[in-house]
Each structure stands twice: as structure tokens, then as C-alpha cells.
Image (cartoon, grey):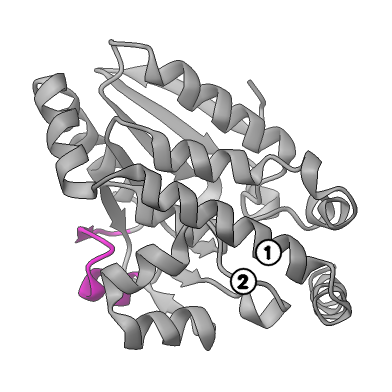
Amino acid sequence: MSEKMLVSCSDGVLRLTFNRPEKKNALDRETYRALIQALDAARGDETIGAVVFSGAGGDFTAGNDLADFRDFMEKPEEFPALAFVRALAAFEKPMVAAVTGDAVGVGATMLFHCDLVYANAGARLRMPFIDLGLVPEAGASLLVPRRFGMARASQYLLAGEGFSGEDAFRLGLVNELAEPETVLEVAIGAARRLAQKPAAALRAARRLIRGDPAEVLARIDLEAALFAQALATPEARARISAFFGRRE
């Protein structure tokens, strides 16, 4: 595991905490690999009934680490973000998210794979793929319209507008709003209650609710192919370079 992601387990709940607060918990390849490893281990561990994702220091995650993403532009096959979102889509146990502060890019799209999401009203979510000359990822092009409807999906995916935790609650992505200092506590409590339920029945019900993961995995792969194509275009490279310039 990596110090960039804290791992703990109690009462049947695996806690995965993004731990780069100085970088708004941006995810680099080391963090992605640690996440994949943790989910893989949890899959076969019968003592784990649910997983909670959270971020240290006030933010959930600002998405991909900029420096790592710059390298990804040159060697996309070496970047493990795709393997992570595929692991999310294929994971069979309940996943819960505790969202405060920024949840950008994959930090927002991964929430559509979670079964329960808790946030503070002022949390800031955004999926700015089009503004970078790219396409949505993590199955967002399929899951966001299903959850939000076509009009809101266009607003947040095509126009790239940000939305708050309160907006996400109203739209049905967030289950409950809480004060920033209690969001994690509420999420862990919900995960513990899930972990105490009959495991086989819970997983079967989850499959019925969420449907066949093959459809989502196929969309993730299609998005990834189009993402790679877009990444190779001069427009996308110019926009990403300009974005780097604003953030550095």
C-alpha cells in the first residue's frame, strides 16, 4: 500500500482514505495501484462487508494528479486509472463515499458507482472533460444521464458546469447532507449497518438494483478508446497544457 492512501478496517468496514491533502488528494498512479490492490483484496475477504471512500484534509479528491497526467499523455498504456474505474464497476460489495470539498473529474464520476453517498451542502463537484478537449470516463456517459436525466447530464458533462453537494442531493446522487465535520461519521455508520446485513442477500439485491456490470464495463472501455483518441489531438493537448499553466 501507499502512504498516499490510508487503509483501515473495523466492524466489517474497509476505509480507503485519499491522503494527499496538500494536493487536494489528487490521484496519481501510485494511489490508483493502491486502490486497485485494496479492492482486489476486499473482494475475497469475507470479513469485509462494505467499503468507504473519503479524503483527508477537507477535500474528497481533485481528480487526476497533473504531473502524472502529463506523463499519461505520452504513455497512456502505463496509467492505471482505467483499471481502477473498471475495478469499481466490477466490485460486488457495497461502496459508500464521504464527500467534502472538491470532487473533480474521477472524484465525481466514481460516485456514480457507489451505493450510498454522503456530502456537505457546500461540496464542489465538477466533470470538466469537454473543457479539456476530452470525453467523459468511468462510464459517466451512461450513468449520469440515467441518474440525472438528459438535460442535467448535458449541463454537467457537455457544458461542464459545477454543482454543489446540495445540488447532488436534490438530483439523487447524494443520499444525505451533513455538516463537513460529520460527513465521514455518517458514511461510516451507514457502511457498518450494511456490513451487518446478510452478505449473500445484500450482494444479490445490489446486482438486481444496479444491473449487469457488463454494460457499464463496455461503456468504460469505449470511453477509454475515445479518450485516448482525443488525447492525441492538438486541441486537447493545447487545452491540457493551458490548464496545467493555470494550476502550476
Q: Is residue 177 magenta?
A: yes
Label 2 vs 1, first from the N-terminus: 2
> Could you tell whether 219 is left or right of 199 in the image?
right
Q: Which residue is mark 1?
A: 227
Quarter of the image with the C terminus is bottom right
Name the amino acid type tagged 2: Val
Amino acid type at mark 1: Phe
Answer with the quarter of the image where residue 44 lies.
Answer: top left
Above/below status of 83 relative to 69 = above
Q: Mark 2–mark 1 contact, CB under 8 Å?
A: yes
Circle 2 residue = 135
Secondary structure, mark 1, is helix
Residue at image location 89% in from the left, 78% down from the top: 234
Q: Give the residues in magenta.
A: 165-179
Secondary element at tag 2: loop
Q: Which of the pair 13/172 is nearer the observer?
A: 172
Q: Quadrant of the N terminus?
A: top right
Q: Quadrant of residue 104?
A: bottom right
Q: Position of residue 236 (x, y in %)?
A: 80, 76
| Percent position of residue 95, x then y | 32, 39
Q: Decide which of 154, 187 is in the foreground and name it.
A: 154
| Nearest to the observer: residue 67 or residue 42 | 42
Could you tell me if residue 217 is visible in this image?
Answer: yes
